[in-house]
């Protein structure tokens, strides 16, 4: 099995962490979808990473689909509850984390355009989503040890990847000071080998 993706993508990192937490072996194929010589569209018609190539050659794309698949193929360390209500709460956390990452990625790409072509209104709109998402994350976490209570789940992985991406790409946001409980959660996550081994580089 293969995982195709970049070393900076929080969505790829999420898949890498889930696979590591569940002791699933795979080959990491580094491919940046923005590069002119990218092969990603050959595996995902949408041209996005991550892409998971299964043993029969078929592919899965979208990190949410991939991590659900990975959680189903190995009995080790389930990261998603089986009961419907707790499961949907974990998926809600994941959707919130992914939404913040989407907004952050749009800001990053917009700022790569020539200064005269950038849209300040567009950047402000995405920043508004980002800050609103962080505020809800912080409120929902409260004083809990983990996002859904006392058990480490996919919710924590998704949130940790989001916070790691913000720290990597947007250190000027200073989200730690605004949301100290998220900062404590992130530091706790960074003590796990699966997070230490997947810090974004590039």
Image (cartoon, rainbow, N blue to C red):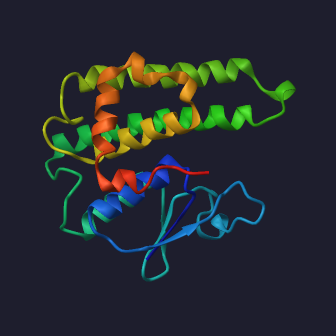
Residue found farthest to the right:
116
Q: Is residue 152 left or right of residue 135?
A: left
Seen in the picture, residue 6 relative to 89 is either above or below; the reply is: below
Residue in the foreground of this view, choosing between 119 and 56: 119
Q: Position of residue 160 (x, y in %)?
A: 37, 40
Residue in the foreground of this view, choosing between 124 and 72: 124
Task: Examine the image and state in which quarter residue 69 appears.
Answer: bottom left
Task: Examine the image and state in which quarter residue 169 appears.
Answer: top right
Q: Position of residue 1 (x, y in %)?
A: 43, 77
Task: Examine the image and state in which quarter residue 49 appears.
Answer: bottom right
Residue at (44% x, 55% y) in the render: 198
User: How many numbered marks appear?
Assistant: 0
Residue at (19% x, 23% y) in the render: 143
Q: Is residue 74 left or right of residue 15?
A: left
Q: Position of residue 27 (x, y in %)?
A: 47, 74
Residue at (66% x, 57% y) in the render: 33
Seen in the picture, residue 138 relative to 166 is either above or below; the reply is: above
Q: Position of residue 144 (x, y in %)?
A: 18, 29
Q: Is residue 112 left or right of residue 90?
A: right
Seen in the picture, residue 49 relative to 153 is either above or below; the reply is: below
Q: Is residue 174 left or right of residue 114?
A: left
């Amino acid at each position: 099995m293969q995982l195709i993706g970049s070393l900076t993508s929080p969505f790829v990192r999420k898949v890498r962490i889930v696979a590591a937490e569940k002791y699933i072996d795979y080959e990491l194929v580094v491919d940046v979808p923005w590069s002119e010589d990218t092969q990603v569209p050959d595996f995902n018609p949408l041209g996005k990473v991550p892409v998971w190539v299964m043993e029969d050659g078929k592919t899965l794309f979208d990190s949410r689909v991939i991590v659900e698949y990975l959680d189903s193929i190995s009995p080790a360390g389930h990261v998603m509850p089986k009961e419907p209500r707790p499961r949907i709460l974990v998926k809600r956390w994941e959707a919130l984390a992914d939404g913040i990452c989407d907004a952050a990625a749009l800001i990053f790409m917009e700022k790569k355009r020539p200064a005269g072509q950038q849209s300040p209104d567009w950047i402000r709109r995405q920043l508004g989503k980002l800050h609103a998402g962080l505020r809800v994350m912080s409120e929902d976490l409260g004083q809990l040890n983990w996002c859904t209570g006392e058990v480490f789940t996919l919710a924590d992985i998704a949130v940790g990847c989001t916070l790691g991406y913000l720290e990597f790409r947007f250190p000027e946001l200073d989200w730690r000071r605004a949301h100290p409980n998220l900062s404590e959660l992130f530091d706790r996550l960074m003590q796990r080998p699966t997070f230490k081994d997947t810090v974004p580089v590039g």
